[in-house]
Image (cartoon, rainbow, N blue to C red):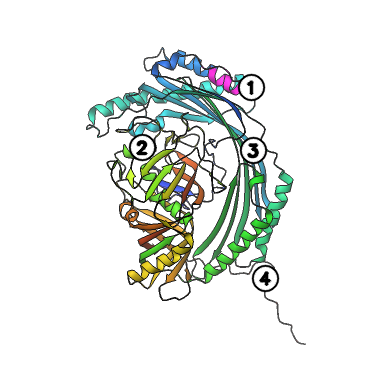
Amino acid sequence: MKSFGWMETHGGWKAGAKQFLRFAGCWALAAQLAWLPLVSAATDKAATKTTTPTAAADADKPAPKGSADPVMKVMQAELARATADLAKTDSAPYFMSYTVYDQNLVVLVGAYGSLLTDASLERRQADVTMRVGSAALDNTHGQSRATGMTSGTLPVGDDQDAIARVLWELTDREYKRAAPAFLNVKTNTAVRAEEEDKSPDFSKEVSETHLVNATAPPAFDRAAWGAEVRRLSGAFRKYPDIYFANVVVQVSDSNSRMVSSEGSAIETPSASTRMVMEAQTRADDGMELLRVETFQAPSAAGLPSEAELNAKIVKMADDLKALKAAPVAEPYDGPALLSGRAAAVFFHEVLGHRLEGHRQRDEDEGQTFTKKVGQEVLPKFLSVTDDPTLREVGGMKLAGTYDFDSEGVPSHRVEVIKDGILKNFLMSRMPIKDFSQSNGHGRNQPGLMPTGRQGNLIVTSTQSVPEAEMRQKLIDEVKRQNKPYGLYFDDIQGGFTLTTRSLPQAFQVLPVIVYKVYADGRPDELVRGVDIVGTPLAALTRILMTGDQQHVFNGVCGAESGQVPVSAVAPAMLFSEMEVQKRQHSHDRPPILPPPGFEESKPEVKQ
């Protein structure tokens, strides 16, 4: 699996498509124009909600009433028609759902004082999900999960006949995949050895009705923000050592609608604004150096002021200049201090992905914690929850907030680890042994089947010291171990983790700002080109204490079910031992020519 990191938009997949299914990775940038699940909680909305018991037999129950939305109406009507007609076939689906994603985007991209992109886009996509067989065994079993969904583009606007025609075509296409896939599943199940986890393929949940009267999103002054993006990106022109820089603003007004044969009808509008400022340089040895600042808010009004953003740009430029001159770090194994942001990414990578429910069932997975429920997996002073219902921490909005997951289940706060003891997993509607129900963590990007995913992963501690004392605690530990120095990881760009059995159960976290902290009183020394590496069971036992303040890392995480917005929250952490390795890098030379305006003045030619 691949997680909070930079081989993502930040980079590219080095593994093949099959390996990607076992490679979780999360991004700090995520300014890409990819479909993200439109599940962020909408604020200031009037809604009606009902909850009723349901079962597979509810497939012939009439769709709920109450929505005045023409798109929702045609979804309900076409689903009822398809359910009734397909019930007459030999391989009748026992569950069907339609999910329609609307997204209105405005994207502004600026570089060096000009706009590279000033675009808007309206798009609508539909996912048709179908399960043939029974909840105990259906067409999505094992490696056949992709047969459970067909996706396509829907007409925008309110032309119900056009929308119905496309939904009909997608439904027909999906049934022609799901029915034969179920026959293959039955054959494969009959000839294969018995599976260790005999849980059903689909959980029984209550149906939900959540019909929203969405208010208009806050007005976005495109001209004013275009001018600000030009000014901000133009600030990078004064730095000759920066050879690539841009500023991106992405404003999204979205709505997700879901109806199911169980009787659910859910509308979840959302609005978000994301800004990314990125700058790069290259050291003399060819190592590329990156600084990224990201900001997220429900609307553009929630972004920092232009003065604050300009101060961030100055800091980014200063950091890159210092990194360019910094020495390359050597491999190291010893005491280390992670800032709160760095610790948040560390926990997302090392622990969070291994607590996602489907990884406990898939026999290709390493199943690091599958049989450790009730056992101590962290120091007793640490607890971990995942709470998508939480909207902010310390005044910072959380990216992993949502009201309903992608399977129509309300989001839940899940206490996964309490006082070091493993209690629970992050569950979708795929049951696992001893955990038969979803806890609202089934998430996906449009076009992919939902799996159990992280939302807002939050680490808390009962063994903390004032954050200002953490550096001295690091020095004390360095002296105790008789090491010449420790490492302080101040900022992080992301990371990734491997969870499959066919590869080492390892993780890699990608720091940006790292200092050597000397025990003999010498000033801290900035170094570059170092990655945190290790294996989870060993690394998680080496936490000695934490700071007393929570810090937030917002990002985008990619895994089997695609890219989803996530947050991780943690205090600074002191480790008795942390292993780092040199980072691979290219050997391309820095730019040969100076940037325009920075040419050396030519000496005068005497006559």
Label 2 and label 4: CA atoms lie apart by: 55 Å
**Taking 521 as reference, is 319 left or right?**
right
The residues tagged by marks 3 and 4 sit, at their Cα atoms, a distance apart of 39 Å
Residue 159 marker: 1
Tell whether position 28 is magenta. no
Give the mark, 2 or 4, whose residue is nearer the N terminus: 2
Q: Which residue is drawn at 67% across and 61% down?
A: 235
Q: Give the secondary structure at mark 3.
A: strand
Few, some or many residues within 10 Å of mark 2 (<14, 14–19, 20+): many
Is residue 349 found left or right of 41 in the rendered image?
left
**Which amino acid type is marked by label 4?**
Phe
Please tell me which of labels 2 and 3 falls first in the chain.
Answer: 3
- Mark toward the start of the polypeptide (1 vs 3): 3
Q: Which mark is residue 66?
A: none
Residue 212 x/y as whole percent: 59, 26
Q: Name the residue at the bottom extreme.
A: 607
Do the CB atoms of the residues marked 2 and 4 lie less than 8 Å apart? no
Note whether 477 is above or below 173 in the view shown.
below
The span shown in magenta is: 63-76
* The quarter of the displayed image where residue 165 is located: top right
In this view, the mark in front (2 or 4): 2
Query: For the residue labelled by badge 1, is the local secondary structure a helix, a strand or a loop?
Result: loop
Determine whether the residue tagged by mark 4 lies in a helix, strand or loop: loop
Say few, some or many: other residues with alpha carbon within 10 Å of mark 3 (under 14 / 14 to 19 / 20 or more). few
Q: What amino acid is at disc 1?
A: Asp
Per the image, the residue denoted by label 4 is: 598
In this rendered view, identify the residue nearer to me: 296 or 383: 383
Q: Which residue occupies 67% across, 43% down?
A: 119
**Which mark identifies residue 358?**
2
Q: Residue 121 carries which label?
A: 3
